[in-house]
Image (spheres, rainbow, N blue to C red):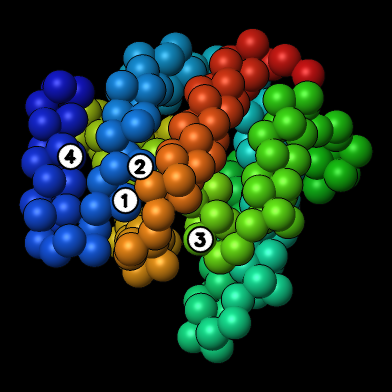
Amino acid sequence: MIEMSLRIFYKKAAILYERTDIMKLAERLFKTTEELWKSYLEHPFVKGIADGSLDIDRFRFFMIQDYRYLLEYSRVFAFGILKSHREDIMRRFAVMVRETLDGEMAIHKKYMARLGITPDEVKNSKTALLNQSYTSYMLDVAFKGDELDILVAVLSCAWSYQYIGQTLAKIPGAIENETFGEWIEGYCSEEYVANTEDIIGLVNELGEGISEERAAYLEEVFKNCGRYEYGFWDMSYNKEM
């Protein structure tokens, strides 16, 4: 079932990228982590979400760390407002900040309440070392770079979660799971996919005609963030601080 879902995902991606030359940068970035993304689906944390067998304490750990991650993720988007020179792009970054703080994080709060995670527990928790390293890397890219660098830094997280959500949703019974189904559904929802596609569209718009040197650097950023994403699954599964 996962293999069939992957074929459908890649077929849709191919159609999307063949529509116009402007999509080539996103396609290039995607190909640098294609095999890595496949490995996400084989990680015991993700497989545990898919079949409902994931230990709830591991998921609680993940939710707290992911919430803390999203706070920093929002700051990366905020750098986009600071670095942008076009009003339309500033507004789009502002929407991304709002969608993270008032959308994705609001869903996290509801989920955490159901898991018995109190606001004080989140407030008094520490950020795991890998989580801190990952968000510090993105913030460093944002501080040193421009709008395109920022978008590429956040795209790995946004796009890979869509990829995981859409793949797991096709597994019979996964989205109906009482504990994890809502999480899966959130990352394959029309709203979430639209937000991710907006980032992809901006990456391709701003990436049109860039130099080979610049493209190679963006590949490196995207790949590094992809490696951090895998590390985040490891960190959560092992509850590693």
Most extreme residue toward the right, as rendered?
Answer: 124
Residue positioned 45% across, 45% down in the render: 213
Tell me whether the residue at label 2 lies in contact with that at label 3, contact meaning CB atoms closer than 8 angstroms: no
For the residue carrying disc 3, how many other residues have a C-alpha within 10 Å: few (<14), some (14-19), or many (20+)? many
For the residue carrying disc 2, how many other residues have a C-alpha within 10 Å: few (<14), some (14-19), or many (20+)? many
Residue positioned 50% across, 61% down in the render: 148
Distance from Cα at disc 3 to Cα at disc 4: 25 Å
Q: Secondary structure at mark 1?
A: helix
Quarter of image, res 169 = top left
Q: Nearer the viewer, residue 49 or 28?
A: 28
Residue at image mark 3:
148
Amino acid bearing label 3:
Leu
- Please indicate whether residue 100 sits to the left or right of residue 123 in the image: left
Label annotation for residue 26: 1
Please state which of the two labelled residues, at mark 4 or mark 2, is closer to the viewer.
Answer: 2
Mark earlier in primary sequence (4, 1): 4
- Please indicate whether residue 4 sits to the left or right of residue 207 in the image: left
Quarter of image, res 32 = top left
Q: Secondary structure at mark 4?
A: helix
Distance from Cα at disc 1 to Cα at disc 3: 12 Å
Q: Nearer the viewer, residue 84 or 53?
A: 84
Residue at image mark 2:
29
Tell me whether the residue at label 2 lies in contact with that at label 1, contact meaning CB atoms closer than 8 angstroms: yes
Label annotation for residue 9: 4
Amino acid bearing label 2:
Leu
Query: Percent position (x, y) of residue 64?
Result: 70, 36
